[in-house]
Image (cartoon, grey):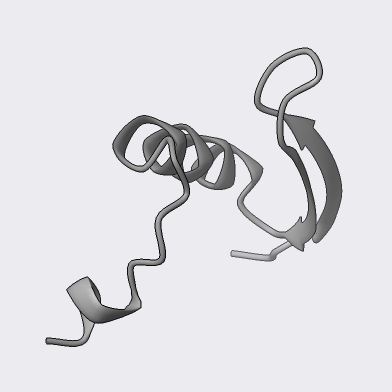
């Protein structure tokens, strides 16, 4: 399987958060961004939660 990198610019909504990056799995990236927005809408720092 060959990977083709894609540069992406996505917005969560009009006047919302703007995401930019490079990925070879654009569909997976979009799904992850939806998950992040849904589970952490206030963009809390999750470092302590993930590393405890």
- Outermost top residue: 14
Query: Which residue is at a point 42% across and 44% down the rendered structure image?
Result: 36
**Where is residue 7 drawn, in percent x and y?**
88, 52
Would residue 19 appear left or right of 41 to someone viewing this image? Answer: right
**Where is residue 47 drawn, in percent x and y?**
34, 78
**Where is residue 28 drawn, in percent x and y?**
50, 44
Asked if 37 appears above or below 46 in the picture, the reply is: above
Q: Quadrant of residue 19?
A: top right
Would residue 2 appear left or right of 8 to someone viewing this image? Answer: left
Asked if 12 appears above or below 36 in the picture, the reply is: above
Q: Quadrant of the N terminus?
A: bottom right
Query: Which residue is at a point 52% across and 41% down the rendered structure image?
Result: 33
- Outermost bottom residue: 52
Query: Which residue is at a point 11% across and 86% down the rendered structure image?
Result: 52
Q: Quadrant of residue 4?
A: bottom right
Asked if 7 appears above or below 35 in the picture, the reply is: below
Of 38 and 27, which appears nearest the observer?
38
């Amino acid at each position: 399987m060959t990977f083709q990198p894609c540069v992406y610019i996505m917005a969560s909504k009009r006047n919302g958060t703007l995401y930019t990056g490079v990925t070879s799995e654009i569909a997976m990236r979009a799904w992850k961004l939806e998950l992040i927005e849904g589970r952490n809408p206030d963009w809390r720092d999750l470092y302590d939660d993930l590393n405890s």
